[in-house]
Image: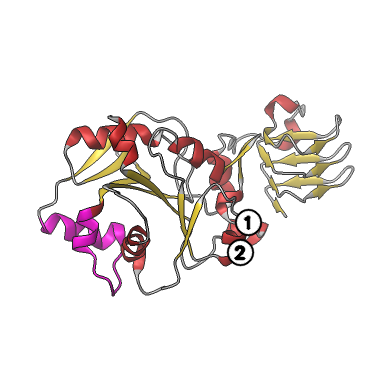
């Protein structure tokens, strides 16, 4: 990949659709603000994945006014206010608001964990000569990332009307003669959409349904993902869970296959199994 590729590309992160997910409802948190590791949210992981792919700030497309308020100033926010545009229409409208010379759009589904550096996707796309590259795992599983030539999007998506990106626009682009193909990458971990508790546990690599919490020794090393800001008593037993933000787990408590939100408090001796605690 040449330096000019990064200068003329933009990473556009799709931050949800018309409806919130069950996990977002349970935690009262947008998916991008969920913990993905002990020191990073999903948004921060996408920002890291974008390093080397663009010289621009990450652009987030959202219709969630509350998310727009809490996003850091280091990202560019574009509000999607028209529910009748569909994904392709919303991306086209967002791209039209970008300044400067943008030739390639890296369109990413933000309700997933990034499975591959976006610079790798851009480099493969630039070398392929395709108009559209769909990032996939070696087994063909979709990774939620597209590399799209911006002029094709402008030509093929109208300024009004509804058009879904995956179900409608790809076929229309192919009918117009655009070269579309899969860009395959060796990936580790789960890159599926995060809608429910099990999805986040899979994404964090801590979903092991055959274990029973009564059999556990409660070693912290097997806890899962525990935020550095969380407070966990030394006698608490944690396993296969995601502990976010400033959550607190008191003495002799058990947390198993569960998700604790940033303000959650599990009291002494309490048992939390297969639950989401806001």
Q: Is residue 211 left or right of residue 251?
A: left
Dividing the picture into quadrants, the one containing residue 55 is top left
Please report contact status of discs 2 and 1: CB closer than 8 Å, yes or no: yes
Q: Quadrant of the N terminus?
A: top left
Classify 10 Å Cα crowding around label 1: few (below 14), some (14-19), many (20 and above): few
259 relative to 66, above or below: above
Q: Is residue 197 magenta?
A: no
Give coordinates of residue 189: x percent, y percent: 47, 33
Q: Is residue 139 visible?
A: no
Q: Is residue 181 visible?
A: yes
Whole-percent x, y for residue 34 in the image: 61, 47
Task: Residue 205: give x, y in percent of width and height.
Answer: 55, 34
At x 30%, y 72%, the residue is 162
Front position in the image: 106 or 226: 106
Q: Quadrant of residue 223?
A: top right
Q: Residues within 10 Å of mark 2 (few under 14, many from 20)?
A: few
Q: Is residue 208 above or below residue 262?
A: above
Q: How is the image coloured?
A: secondary structure
Question: Is residue 153 magenta-colored?
Answer: yes
Give SS at disc 2.
Answer: helix
Q: Left or right: 177 with respect to 212? A: left
Residue positioned 67% across, 48% down in the render:
274
> For residue 202, what is the image quadrant?
top right
> Where is residue 70 drawn, in percent x and y?
63, 56
User: Circle 1 — which element?
Assistant: helix
Look at mark 2 in the image and give the residue it sits on. Answer: 66
- Please identify the dominant SS of the magenta region: helix
The residue beneath circle 1 is 70
Q: In the image, what residue occupies the spot 83% across and 34% down?
A: 236
Span of residues in magenta: 151-176
Q: How many marks?
A: 2
């Amino acid at each position: 990949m040449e330096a000019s590729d990064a200068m003329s590309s933009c990473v556009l992160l799709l931050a949800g659709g018309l409806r919130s997910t069950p996990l977002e409802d349970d935690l009262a948190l947008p998916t991008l603000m969920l913990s993905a590791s002990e020191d990073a949210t999903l948004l921060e992981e996408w920002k890291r994945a974008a390093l080397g792919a663009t010289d621009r700030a990450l652009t987030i497309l959202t219709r969630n006014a509350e998310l727009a308020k809490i996003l850091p100033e280091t990202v560019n926010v574009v509000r999607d206010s028209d529910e009748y545009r569909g994904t392709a229409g919303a991306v086209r409208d967002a791209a039209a608001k970008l300044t400067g010379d943008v030739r390639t759009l890296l369109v990413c589904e933000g309700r997933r964990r990034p499975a591959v550096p976006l610079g790798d996707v851009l480099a493969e796309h630039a070398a392929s000569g395709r108009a559209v590259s769909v990032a996939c795992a070696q087994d063909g599983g979709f990774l939620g990332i597209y590399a799209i030539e911006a002029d094709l999007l402008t030509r093929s998506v109208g300024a009004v009307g509804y058009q879904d990106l995956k179900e409608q626009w790809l076929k229309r682009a192919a009918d117009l003669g655009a070269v579309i193909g899969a860009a395959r990458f060796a990936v580790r971990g789960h890159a599926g959409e995060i809608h429910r508790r099990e999805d986040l546990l899979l994404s964090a690599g801590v979903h092991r349904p055959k274990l029973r919490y009564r059999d556990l020794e409660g070693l912290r090393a097997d806890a899962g993902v525990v935020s550095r800001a969380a407070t966990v008593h030394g006698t608490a037993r944690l396993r296969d869970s995601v502990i976010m933000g400033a959550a607190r787990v008191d003495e002799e408590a058990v947390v198993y296959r569960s998700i604790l939100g940033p303000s959650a408090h599990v009291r002494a001796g309490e048992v939390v199994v297969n639950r989401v605690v806001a």
